[in-house]
Image: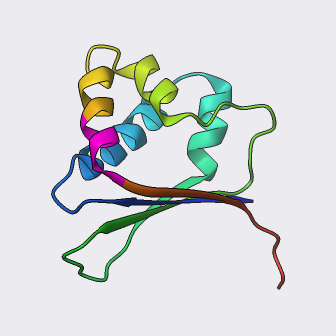
Amino acid sequence: MRAIRAVYHPASAAGRAVRSLAQALDANSDPVRRQQAAAWRMLRSSEPSRDAVVYVFLLDPVVPRADYDPVRVLSESLPAEVQPLYDKLKASVIRVERMALTKLR
């Protein structure tokens, strides 16, 4: 299991990027991407904050040898939109943390 915690400025393109990523995964017909889509949960903090918006991506199970680069996933489905979306998202990132998790219970 892996988790990615991404923190963005509140007035950013993060919400649009996450929605686009979810749509790109759901629309992809590649068998590996379909496996990823089934196991890739995307969550947004429901606690209001003026300072940041927090997204958590849970990957469980991780598909072996699959590429989880969200820019690559987006470029497969939305090649014309990926660069402007990436540029806006990159400018709004506060912090991204990746972690492998071990289930304790």
Q: Position of residue 105 (x, y in %)?
A: 82, 85
Question: What colour scheme does the image use?
Answer: rainbow
Q: Position of residue 53 (x, y in %)?
A: 30, 66
At which x and y percent is residue 86?
A: 33, 31
Q: Which corner quadrant holds the N terminus?
A: bottom right
- Please indicate whether residue 12 sits to the left or right of residue 105 in the image: left
Question: In the rendered image, which quarter is residue 11 located in?
Answer: bottom left
- Quarter assignment of residue 55: bottom left
Q: Residue at x 45, y 37 (%)?
A: 26
**Residue furthest out toward the top:** 80
Viewer-side residue, 43 vs 82 = 82
Q: Is residue 10 above or below residue 47?
A: above
Count up the numbered dots: 0
Q: Which residues are magenta?
A: 88-93
Residue plotted at (42% across, 27% down): 74
Locate residue 3, reporting x and y percent. 63, 60
Does residue 11 appear to the left or right of 95 in the view shown? left
Query: On the rendered structure, is 99 left or right of 76?
Result: right
Q: Is residue 91 above or below residue 80?
A: below
Q: Residue at x 66, y 30 (%)?
A: 67
Q: Main secondary structure of the magenta part?
A: helix
Q: Is residue 75 shown in magenta? A: no
In the rendered image, the vertical position of residue 23 relative to residue 60, given as above or below: above
**Residue shown at 76%/67% (left/top)?**
101
